[in-house]
């Protein structure tokens, strides 16, 4: 659903420029092909250096940082599912009558 008087689907600042509702837009808009068809981009008016600082972590924390990706209960679920899948595969091999050492030979490097 296009806005009346518009050639595109832009509804923000670019759409307002296109429909001649405004003459200029001052914003941090990124240049892309769609917008570039309807608006001229000027140079930078204002630039600011942004820095982020964080507290250096304790050396003991570095090892445990890998495990902090998930909560404890999610890690337990991952371990339980992995163990269950290994057990199911092992049981399926036993039920199928295939020898485990025979099937592992195919995995060995030649």
Image (cartoon, rainbow, N blue to C red):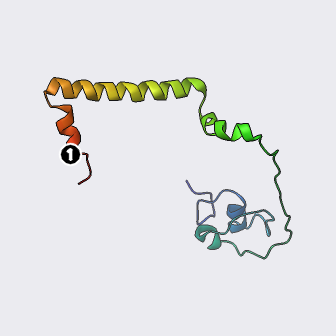
Q: In the displayed structure, would residue 55 be above or below residue 83?
A: below
Q: Nearer the viewer, residue 79 or 98?
A: 98
Note whether 18 is above or below 101 in the view shown: below
Residue that mark 1 sits on: 106
Q: Quadrant of the C terminus?
A: bottom left
Q: Residue at x 26, y 27 (%)?
A: 90
Query: Would you identify the image quadrant in which residue 24 lies?
Result: bottom right
- Number of callouts: 1
Q: Position of residue 66 (x, y in %)?
A: 61, 39
User: Helix, strand, or loop for circle 1?
Assistant: loop
Whole-percent x, y for residue 54 in the image: 81, 47
Give whichever of 80, 23 is nearer the camera: 80
Question: 93 above or below 41?
Answer: above
User: What residue is drawn where x is 59% and y is 66%?
Assistant: 7
Image quadrant where residue 3 sits: bottom right
Taking depth in this image into account, of 67 and 27 the one nearest to the observer is: 67
- Residue 93: x percent and y percent? 20, 29
Query: Crowding near pointer 1: few (<14 within 10 Å), some, many (20+)?
Result: few
Residue positioned 74% across, 41% down in the render? 59
């Amino acid at each position: 659903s296009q806005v009346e008087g518009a050639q595109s689907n832009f509804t923000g600042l670019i759409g307002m420029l296109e429909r001649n509702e405004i003459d200029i837009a001052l914003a941090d808009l990124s240049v892309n092909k769609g917008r570039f068809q309807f608006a001229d981009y000027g140079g930078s008016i204002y630039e600011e250096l942004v820095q982020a600082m964080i507290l250096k972590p304790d050396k003991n924390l570095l090892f445990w940082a890998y495990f902090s990706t998930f909560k404890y209960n999610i890690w337990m679920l991952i371990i339980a599912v992995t163990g269950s899948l290994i057990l199911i595969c092992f049981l399926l091999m036993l039920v199928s009558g295939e020898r485990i050492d025979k099937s592992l030979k195919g995995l060995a490097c030649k």
